């Protein structure tokens, strides 16, 4: 019988994809490593090998989600921010936000996992602030960037639950101008 070799990169990617989907759908506390391994069709011990723990896997999912968002958006200037946010919001459909956004929005019920998520959100706010010229220590500009992030995530939440029209069906072209007003009001004045 031939020996079957594992493709470590492929297996790790499959575990990340499966875990991200499960964490986004079911939440951190309700998702077990056994569930993830079973859905991915691999031995649960491989999760320990590649990610050390459930926390490690969750952190890798968040990191991959943020990296994916960064690849999609590229280097963002202050002028680009409204269009980038509008593009992300436009992707929210009747099934809810894409899994990378759900990971950032959903609390986990686990203090360490929530700490990881808060760290990722804080880094995202710093990135927004940096586009407006922020330097560490300028808490006023960081607060303003956090408010832009909070408003953006709120828009995603309202759109994902189909709460209101015209927000629910607004296109990128319709979303960009009011988002530009928001970003200009909060990040252009220092």
Image (tube, rainbow, N blue to C red):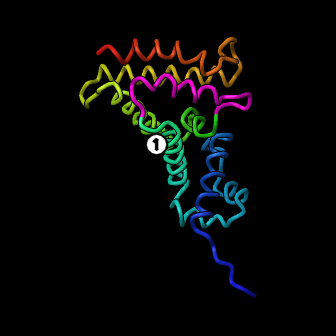
* Residue 27 is a magenta residue: no
- The residue tagged with tag 1: helix, strand or loop? helix
Q: Is residue 41 above or below residue 83?
A: below
Q: In the image, 91: left or right of 189?
A: right
Q: Residue at x 69, y 13 (%)?
A: 164
Q: Is residue 38 above or below residue 138?
A: below
Q: How many marks?
A: 1
Which quadrant would residue 115 be assigned to in this image? top left
Q: Closer to the camera, 172 or 27?
A: 172
Magenta region: 76-97
Which quadrant would residue 103 be assigned to in this image? top right
The spot of residue 141 in percent (x, y) is 32, 21
The spot of residue 75 in percent (x, y) is 41, 37
Residue sitting at the far left: 137
The residue carrying mark 1 is 116
The spot of residue 130 in percent (x, y) is 33, 30
Q: Closer to the camera, 80 or 57?
A: 80
Q: Residue at x 66, y 17 (%)?
A: 170
Residue sitting at the far bottom: 1
- Check the picture and name the quadrant holding the C terminus: top left
The spot of residue 126 in percent (x, y) is 36, 32
């Amino acid at each position: 019988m031939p020996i079957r070799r594992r493709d470590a990169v492929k297996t790790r990617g499959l575990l990340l994809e499966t875990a991200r989907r499960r964490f986004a759908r079911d939440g951190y506390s309700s998702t077990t490593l056994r569930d993830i391994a079973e859905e991915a069709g691999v031995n649960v011990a491989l999760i320990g090998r590649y990610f050390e723990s459930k926390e490690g896997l969750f952190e890798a999912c968040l990191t991959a989600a943020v990296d994916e968002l960064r690849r999609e958006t590229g280097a963002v200037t202050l002028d680009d921010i409204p269009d980038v946010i509008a593009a992300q919001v436009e992707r929210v459909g009747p099934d809810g936000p894409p899994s990378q956004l759900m990971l950032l929005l959903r609390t986990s019920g686990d203090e360490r996992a929530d700490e990881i998520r808060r760290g990722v959100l804080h880094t995202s706010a710093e990135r927004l602030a940096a586009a407006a010229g922020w330097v560490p220590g300028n808490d006023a500009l960081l607060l303003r960037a956090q408010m832009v992030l909070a408003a953006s995530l709120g828009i995603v939440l309202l759109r994902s639950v189909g709460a209101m029209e015209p927000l629910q069906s607004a296109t990128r072209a319709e979303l960009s101008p009011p988002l530009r007003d928001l970003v200009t009001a909060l990040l252009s004045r220092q």
